[in-house]
Amino acid sequence: MPPFTYELFVYDANNCFQLVNFTITQASGIGNNTASDYNISPSILTRGTNLNFSNNSPNAVQLLNVYNANGQVVFGQSNITQNLSIPTNNWASGMYLVQWISNKGIQTAKIIVQ
């Protein structure tokens, strides 16, 4: 599948906006999302369940962000050299995009919180 780039305009109550760009390089179905040396699991989870990001690469991930459907960053961390467990206690139900930047470029996975 070729990568798709999207622009998302997020407006606040004062009608001010912020432009968020993201690229989807691999789309997955119901199974666990994987992209090369990295793994996101589970791809469908219940709120309060930790989201696991596995870094099986010898290189660090420079930045990992999780975006909600409004384009807001609900989690962000930089310089990830090992596996990471991300708490989802305060996340609303819905679709989220997990985006990370590594030496392989920008990769994105979709997850669903029930």
Image (cartoon, rainbow, N blue to C red):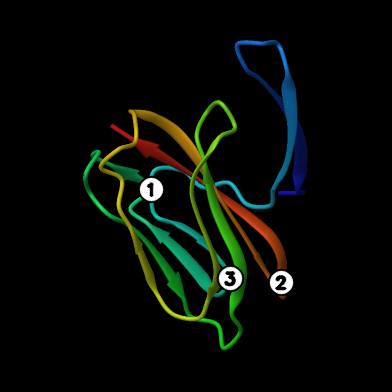
Q: Earlier in the sequence, mark 3 or mark 2?
A: 3
Q: Is residue 38 left or right of residue 107?
A: left
Viewer-nearest residue: 26 or 17 = 17
Position of 20 relative to 39 (above/below): above
2 or 1: tag closer to the N-terminus? 1
Residue denoted by label 3? 36
Does residue 70 lie above or below 80 as drawn? Answer: above
Q: Secondary structure at mark 3?
A: loop
* Residue 79: quarter of image: bottom right
> Which of marks 1 and 3 precedes in the sequence?
3
**Crowd tier of the residue under label 1, counting other residues whose Cα lies within 10 Å: few below 14, some 14–19, many 20 or above:** many
Assess whether mark 2 and mark 3 are in contact (beta carbons under 8 angstroms).
yes
- Would you place residue 62 above or below residue 95 in this image? below
**In which quadrant will I find the C terminus?**
top left
**Which residue corresponds to the image point at 73% horizontal and 18% vertical from the top-left?**
16
Mark count: 3
Establish if 67 lies above or below 98.
above
Which residue was labeled with disc 2?
A: 104
**Residue behind mark 1:** 43
